[in-house]
Amino acid sequence: MALKTVHVSLPGGLSGYVERMVKGGRYQAASEIVREALRRMEAAELADELRQLKRAFAGGHNRSETEEDIQRVEAAVQARGP
């Protein structure tokens, strides 16, 4: 995977947190912290999308689709984006 350099500005509190995490030895560099945070954000978003889709399809085995069901599925798909 090719890496791209991105510069990020952090407020003092977050910058201090990143420095403490690196100094504490949990991470080798600030970039590792940012990558992990982004991976966790992405995983949380995907989990939320999955929950929305499950809710949209909930109960579909025992009844016909309603207009509300279709709208919930469409909204979940649109929220996901391209």
Image (cartoon, rainbow, N blue to C red):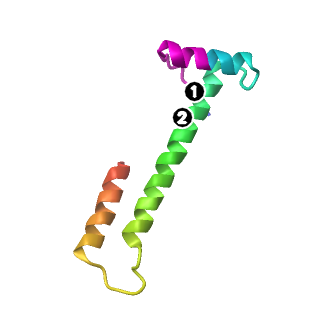
| Residue 79 percent location from the top left of the image | 33, 51
Q: Is residue 12 above or below residue 61?
A: above
Specify the quadrant of the image occupied by residue 30: top right
For the residues labelled 2 and 1, the Cα–Cα distance comes to: 6 Å
Q: Which residue is mark 2?
A: 38
Residue 2 visible (yes or no): no
At a point 60% along the width and 19% down the height, the residue shown is 17
Q: Which residue is mark 1?
A: 34
Q: Residues within 10 Å of mark 2 (few under 14, many from 20)?
A: few
Specify the quadrant of the image occupied by residue 70: bottom left
* Left or right: residue 59 compared with residue 37: left
At a point 51% along the width and 42% down the height, the residue shown is 42
| Residue 72 percent location from the top left of the image | 30, 64
* Residue type at numbered disc 2: Leu
Identity of the residue furthest to the right in this view: 25
Residue 22 visible (yes or no): yes
Q: Is residue 29 above or below residue 54?
A: above
Q: Is residue 70 above or below residue 6?
A: below
Mark 2 element type? helix
Q: Which residues are magenta?
A: 4-17
Identity of the residue furthest to the bottom in this view: 62
Image quarter hosting the N terminus: top right
